[in-house]
Amino acid sequence: MQGRIVPANAEWTAEAGNLIRAGALVAFATETVYGLGADATNGEAVARIYETKGRPTFNPLIVHVLGIEQAVIIGTFSPVARMLTEAFWPGPLTLVVPRLETTTVTELVSAGLPTVAIRAPAHPLARALLKEAHRPIAAPSANRSGRVSPTRAEHVASDLGDKIALILDGGPASVGLESTVIGFVNDRPVLLRPGAIAAEAIEDVISDRLSRHTETGEQLSSPGQLRSHYAPNASMRLNAETWQPDEAVLAFGKVSERPSRKTINLSPSGDLVEAAANLFASLRALDQSGASVIAVTPIPTHGLGEAINDRLERAAAPRD
Ligand code: TXA
Ligand code: MG
């Protein structure tokens, strides 16, 4: 059953929708590349995406929706953002917009950024899956980190086959190149990742030149952008074995009982997937306790622990 390639008929698509709702990972065809999908509102399921891809850091993920109605309850769409969705959705255009405070999409999707990337795929299989799942679906390309994006079900099987529940075969991806990612700076569209929709086509719609970044989209929107990731107001002390009563504590696994201003345990049972799912929301909550220091107990560095520690080190790094 594991990693099984199945035809994208009604029965298997319905089964895939059930699996997504149950928190499992399903690979599916889109018009660009195959995606590794999970329920975007389920923190643990999204954490498993990072674990499965072997991503050393939490790069933010794209949330797939059926269309603008589903998108506007996740993020804020300015008039120009709406204009772009009207021109290119459904299709290979991803828009990075401010997250709504009321969204049920997990913060892990945004990797701690105040924004969320959203796209409405055009592929009939992706759309059928979104309908069956009744959920927005977070999905990066379904390859192991550092490998090229898969454009056929067999690519996914050879890369990740033993790690995912099901691979819905929608045939070769027609575009074969990832979606174009557009962000906004002062409401002006900026090309974050060149992709399936040419910049010129976007310029025609906005009747303006599209701002580019000097770096390539991937660099800007992943490692580069991590520098601007959510950093708490409190200073952070990592690998803390002890703490003062006025410090907040971010704990992992079994920890000694000591008074603290506020303690949140990322996973009392020591489960790194659960910890990853809770990380960003917990940091935010501890920061809101008003403590000037957040002490973080040691977190293992294997599996998702590598990404969790990477993220904590960035949050703890000296700031300007
Ligand atoms: O065509 C595609 O976009 C495919 C299919 C499966 O939809 N997905 C895909 O996802 O390429 P992924 O995770 O491989 O690439 C997502 C890109 C990355 O460059 C990421 O940094 C950027 O989108 N991104 C996601 N959320 C972002 C955010 N909040 N701010 C800036 N960049 C973001
Ligand atoms: Mg990718």
Image (cartoon, rainbow, N blue to C red):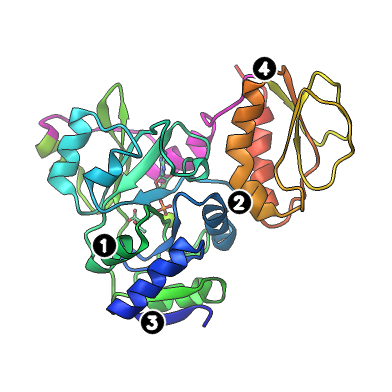
Element type at mark 4: loop
Q: Which residue is mark 2?
A: 56
Q: Measure the C-alpha gap from mark 2 to mark 3.
A: 30 Å
Compared across the picture, whether 282 is left or right of 214 comes to right
Q: Which residue is mark 1?
A: 127
Three-letter code, disc 1: Arg
Element type at mark 2: loop
Circle 1/circle 2 CB separation < 8 Å: no
Q: Which residue is mark 3?
A: 6
Three-letter code, disc 3: Val
Residue 87 percent across, percent down from the top left:
13, 44
- Please report whichever mark, 4 or 3, sits nearer to the chain's N-terminal start: 3
- Please report whichever mark, 1 or 2, sits nearer to the chain's N-terminal start: 2
* Residue at the spot 40% in from the left edge and 74% down from the top edge: 15
Mark 4 or 2: in front is 4
Three-letter code, disc 4: Gly
| Image: 193 above or below 101 | below
Q: Which residue is mark 4?
A: 290
Residue 238 percent across, percent down from the top left:
77, 33
* Residue at the spot 50% in from the left edge and 64% down from the top edge: 22
Front-most of residues 99 and 314: 99
Q: Measure the C-alpha gap from mark 1 to mark 3.
A: 17 Å
